[in-house]
């Protein structure tokens, strides 16, 4: 469902530890909400609990939960991390997006 690159895995693990989460048992919550300059925007946060309607995926030892509404929008997405001086942070490479904004934080189908 959602793939996680090696760079994203390392950054997620570091950030989860810094924020008091345990990467081996806690989750990365990924979702889609209305908003942004292209119509839909991505959400990414850490969570300790899984809701009944969530779908759970694991890739590259990262546990990801996605709410039922967002699953269709995110199928096949690769979560990457781009660091350095010109890096954008976490980047969603979403094959379903027909149009994205310049910053890459929103998209439309």
Image: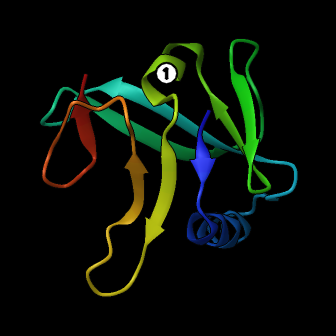
Tell me the residue at 42%/23% (across/down): 73
Q: Residue, x 41% and y 48% (percent of image)?
A: 92
Report the side of 90 relative to 11 (left or right): left
Q: Quadrant of the N terminus?
A: top right
- The answer to whether 38 is drawn above or below residue 46 in the figure is above
In the image, what residue occupies the spot 76% across and 42% down? 58
Residue 53 located left or right of residue 70: right
Q: Which residue is mark 1?
A: 70
- What quarter of the picture does the C terminus occupy? top left
Residue 91 on image: x %, y %: 39, 56
As drawn, the residue found furthest toward the right would be 25
Q: Is residue 83 above or below residue 52?
A: below
Report the number of numbered marks.
1
Question: In the image as oriented, which residue stretches furthest toward the bottom?
Answer: 85
Percent position of residue 42, x then y: 38, 38
Please identify the quarter of the rendering in which residue 63 is found. Answer: top right
Q: Position of residue 56 (x, y in %)?
A: 74, 29
Using the image, determine if residue 58 lies above or below residue 38.
below
Q: Residue at x 69, y 63 (%)?
A: 16
Q: How is the image coloured?
A: rainbow
């Amino acid at each position: 469902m959602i793939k996680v690159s090696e760079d994203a895995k390392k950054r997620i693990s570091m950030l989860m530890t810094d924020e008091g989460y345990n990467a081996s048992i806690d989750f990365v919550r990924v979702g889609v909400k209305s908003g942004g300059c292209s119509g839909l925007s991505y959400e990414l946060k850490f969570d300790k609990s899984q809701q009944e309607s969530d779908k759970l995926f694991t890739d590259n030892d990262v546990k990801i939960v996605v709410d039922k509404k967002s699953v269709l929008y995110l199928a096949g997405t690769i979560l990457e991390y781009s660091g350095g001086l010109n890096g954008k942070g976490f980047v969603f490479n979403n094959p379903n997006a027909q149009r994205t904004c310049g910053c890459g934080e929103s998209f439309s189908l």
